[in-house]
Amino acid sequence: MLIRIDVESTRPLYEQIADAVRGAIGRAELGAGDRLPASNELAEAVGVNVHTVLRAYAQLRDEGLIELRPRRGGVVRASAPLRAPLIDQARRLVEVAQHHGLSRSEILDLVAGEL
Amino acid sequence: MLRIGLGVLLPAALVVAAVVPPLALWSHLPGRLADHWGFGGTANGSMPKPFALGVSFALVALGASLSSCWALGLPGPAAAPVGGRRRVVASGLGLVGTGVFFCGLGAATSLVVTFANLDAPTWHQAHPLGAGTLIGLSGGPLALLVAALYLARCAGEANLGHGRLAETPARLGLSKGERALWVGTARNRWAMPVALVALGVGVALGAGNDWALALSILAVSPAVWLLASVYVTASASGVKVAYGPLRWPVTRIPLRRVTHAEAVEVVPAGWGYRGSLRLFGRAAVIVRKGEGLELSLTGGQSFVVTVDGAVTAAALLNDELTRARGADGEA
């Protein structure tokens, strides 16, 4: 798994880390039960604050992709391989919709219309 | 010459040492030979004469064939076909070291069993074995192993890998503001079962009061467990290899020691931590066959670790090397 972040990008650093992990799960480079790198190790390697990494891991947990365990750190959940690409696509849908000036309720209606 | 001496003459001498004395003294040996001694030094196990000596003969024969394979350049049983982009890791050292070790072990057991049982009416009256004999028995073959490895190194035959990789690794093309951490793992799916079996056998032997054997088998278990998997990271600070489920111990190779990184196809000639950077300038961590990361280090040294996704790791490291050299050039 490659976690690659660009400090010159406008996208927040924690989002970039979360994207990289989500992408790795989607490409099956990370499988259910695999452990994420320790937060201090990742923070040091890519030159960001540990809290930035922890924020990215917390977001992945909120997305239902990983569990955060006291001693083992982030562990990929069994449902993550199916879920990660969906979250990615949902994010892209929202990005495109916002780019075209759709409001929150319009986006929700759009999705509801497809159901 | 050294190659023939080490791979053929030394094993041949050990074969003669193992086979001639027992055969010459055959009529002076009892029908069953003591082949196992308790802690007190008295014999407590025996086997029929042909079997007791046959085991030693088989050991020297196996050892001699392994080391002569190396000396005569024949493909040994552990060596696999060497294609354009495959490489055999540790084949030379592994073959000659293992071969000479088995020869030494076979000769030592043959001689000890023969002289301990010499002129004894039955195996119960075999000469007791003291601590000195035990140390000689285990120390002799070990000393031979170390000497063989050292001489093999001197002979320039200690290449852990040979054959060149056809494919040049791709670059990631990191931009100025980009930072990256690569993480990869490799595991051996047989290591856990083997460690568990060793544990079970060790405990069973311990329960049967054969403590010496039980402890030596029990010692295998954690060693196998430790090398069942590796966790490898690569970044601008270099490469880190962590062993086993605890991710400890850790081997670190800082980026300034690396000159080039390459992904290779590893065909194992043995498993575990092979070689030594300090002694031989070459080391390899082999937990399975297949994809591996080869690092060329300063001073002509090299380090190989088997790991999934090594192509990406090599690309990242080569990018970071270019970047570090660029920074040096500007400074």
Image: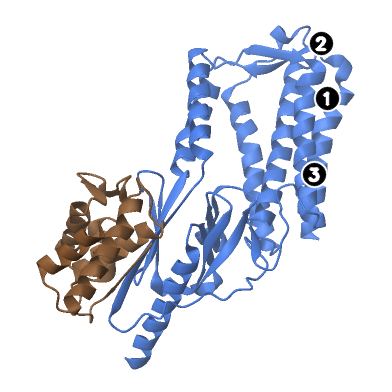
Chain colours: A brown, B blue
List the residue tagged with mark 3: B65
Report in which chain the residue with disc 1 lies.
B
Name the amino acid, label 1: Pro
Residue at the front extreme? A113
Q: Are marks 3 and 2 on the same chain?
A: yes
Quarter occupied by the C terminus of chain B:
bottom left
Q: Which mark is residue A66?
A: none
Rendered view: B320 above or below B114: below
User: Where does residue B68 sit, x and y in percent of width and height?
Assistant: 80, 49
Residue A27 falls left or right of residue B117 = left
- Front residue of B41/B216: it is B216
- Residue B126: image quadrant is top right
Tell me the distance, in whole angstroms, between the alpha carbons under discs 1 and 3: 21 Å
Q: Disc 1 designates what residue? A: B22
- Kindly indicate whether the residues beneath marks 2 and 1 are on one polypeptide chain: yes
Q: Nearer the viewer, residue A57 or B95?
A: A57
- Please name which of the two marks, 1 or 3, marks the residue nearer to the observer: 3
Horizontal side, residue B68 vs residue A18: left or right: right
Residue B139 position (above or below residue B165): above
Which chain does tag 2 point to? Answer: B
Report the amino acid beneath label 2.
Answer: Gly
From the image, tell me which residue sits under label 2.
B31
Badge 1 or badge 3: first in the primary sequence: 1
Rounded to the nearest angstrom, the CA distance separating label 3 from label 2 is 30 Å
